[in-house]
Image (spheres, rainbow, N blue to C red):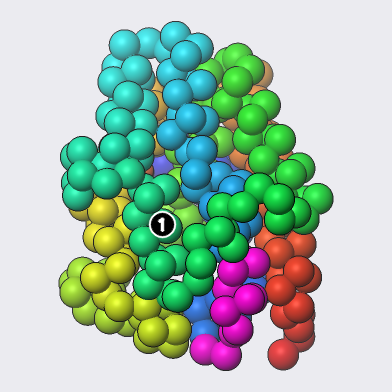
Amino acid sequence: MTSHLQERLLAIMDRKDHWAWKHLTGPGLTRDQLAVHFRHEYRVYVRDFPVLLARVLGQSPPAAVRRALAENLYEEQTGALSLGVSHPELFLEMIDGLGIPRAAIEDEAIPLEPEAHAYRALLDRASAAPPWVVGAAVLTIFVEGSVHERAELLGRREMLPIEEALRAHPMVRHYGCPPERMRLARAHRAVEGGHRRDAWEMVLGHVPDEGPRADAVASAVAEAHAAWMQYRDAVARAMGLPRHG
Ligand SMILES: [Fe+2]
Ligand SMILES: [Fe+2]
């Protein structure tokens, strides 16, 4: 049985989907277009995700929540619970595999779209300001979660065995990334199930199902979704993707 708050959050996650996704998972993009997408993802939240989690931890949540956040942050920043390499570094390994120079992704001198800064500013605010549970919801449910959240909770998410999943990954299939440079997907397969479970427990276990706190969590996640959609629109625009077609 899903709680009322969980259902409100799942209804948002059901819409964590964007029209440009079919372009990003299909063939035909140039290296430059891929670089625009990955540069934004990296600099908006991939590189600093552990730091964002640390800010929520820094707000002194209850002990059980501290453990879940610390474990998630430890893995994201070190990879010590999976492959021994931080997730931002594993992301850059995929960039290497795509033959994109790291500088094209990391260089702070290359501007990002304004909507990317706006989405990041929202993540900065949510992670740094109390109540901690709002930051936890925005980061661990919305940012780390996906459109598959509902299916995953119901145990109905179909996933290929990891070796097959790596071979079928669009960056491998269409863009020549060697499967051995896709260790990020491997690390996520190893630990992300636990992060998904922890995310929901952390939030639902510490917010009354209805009332002002639940409303604050639901509206922060809805705002994150709205800012994310605008961010994704902006990246698609910068890549020159056709909305219809
Ligand atoms: Fe990760
Ligand atoms: Fe994670």
Say which residue appears at 76% left-offset and 78% top-offset. Answer: 240
Q: Position of residue 200 (x, y in %)?
A: 39, 36
Q: Which of these two is toward me, 95 or 67?
A: 95
Say which residue appears at 39% left-offset and 84% top-offset. Answer: 176
Q: Is residue 205 above or below residue 144?
A: above
Say which residue appears at 36% left-offset and 31% top-offset. Answer: 73
Q: Magenta includes 28? A: yes
Q: Which of these two is toward me, 105 or 135?
A: 105
| Residue 152 visible in rendering | no
Q: Amino acid at mark 1?
A: Phe
- Mark 1 sits near ligand 1, with its Cβ under 8 Å away: no
Magenta residues?
27-37
Q: Magenta includes 238? A: no
| Element type at mark 1 | helix
| Residue 43 visible in rendering | yes
Q: Position of residue 15 (x, y in %)?
A: 60, 59
Q: Position of residue 80 (x, y in %)?
A: 20, 38
> Of helix, strand and loop, which mostly describes the magenta segment?
helix
Say which residue appears at 44% left-offset and 66% top-offset. Answer: 95
Q: Which of these two is toward me, 101 or 245?
A: 101
Quarter of the image with the C terminus is: bottom right
**Number of numbered discs:** 1
Q: Is residue 239 above or below residue 109?
A: below
Residue 125 lies in what quarter of the image?
A: top right
* Other residues around mark 1 within 10 Å, as few (<14) / some (14–19) / many (≥20): many
Q: Which residue is mark 1?
A: 91
